[in-house]
Amino acid sequence: MKMTRKVTMMLFAVCFTAICVLYPQNAKAAKLGSYAQAEKKALEKVPGATVIETDRDYDDGVLVYKIELVKGNKTYDLTYRASDAKLIEYEWEKKYVGASKNKAIIGESKCRQLAEKKVPKGTILSIIQKMDDGIDIYKVKMKAGNKSYTLKFHARTGAMIEYKWEIKATASGSSSTSDGYIGLSKAKTIAKNAVPGATVIKAEFDMDDGIPVYEIEMIKGEYEYELKIHAKTGKILEKEKDWID
């Protein structure tokens, strides 16, 4: 019996050692502590790409790494949260797009179908047709789960020319942040109260001349609203209303 127990303990020790060798510092490996680590993660996401620029910054009080890459006719922008190496923003855009003026506009209904196919179970918040650098496009805002999407389609060919999704950076999955910030969720509520019935299409943290602010973009009917809210006091510092082009 003693011999059996001794053999069992030896086997357990061997297995534990093997795990430590194969997965060293597993808990720490999830964090990003350098530019090199961030670039490695980005290249795993976009194999064969070339890193153009890497920045370390704070997004809503959370440390992040932002990596810009290029591959073929596309540029990529990826943002990773440093604390757990989680990808919280992913975007690609075609560098060269023809105007294709000889083709007719595909129509909003067709654009809606393309967007819903790209983001299954997503909810369309807005579809706007406009000119972008001489090209007719449809800009679509969507929401699915905890991700916000921005899609751009060529309005004459139906080809997707830009794709982006993002998850708002938080330190622990909550909407509040450190340093006394009110949090993005509270800022959105303030903005919605200021413009009842409006839909938030974009919300982000920024520093405006040294002042921490939340920049909220909303749409209501044929108008687009932009608000700047003090990140600590919740006071609305700016409010703009523009006709949607």
Image: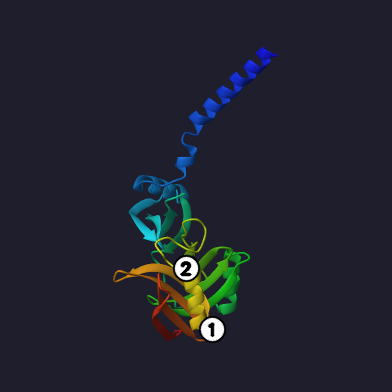
In the rendered image, is residue 120 in sight?
Answer: yes
Q: Say which label, 2 or 1, has the lower sequence index.
A: 2
In the rendered image, is residue 71 in sight?
Answer: no
Q: Which amino acid does the dot numbered 1 rest on?
A: Pro
The image's mark for residue 185 is none
Residue at (40% x, 67% y) in the render: 205
Q: Which amino acid does the dot numbered 2 rest on?
A: Leu
| Mark 2 lies on residue | 184
Residue at (60% x, 68% y) in the render: 116
Question: Residue 19 location, x and y as percent?
Answer: 53, 30
The crowd level at tag 2 (other Cα within 10 Å; few <14, some 14-19, many 20+) is many
User: Which image quadrant: the N terminus?
Assistant: top right
| Mark 1 lies on residue | 196
Work out whether residue 27 or residue 133 is closer to the camera in this orientation and state it: 27
Work out whether residue 169 or residue 117 is closer to the camera in this orientation and state it: 169
Label 1 secondary element: loop
The crowd level at tag 1 (other Cα within 10 Å; few <14, some 14-19, many 20+) is few
Question: Residue 70 location, x and y as percent?
Answer: 38, 56
Residue at (53% x, 81% y) in the render: 198
Label 2 secondary element: helix
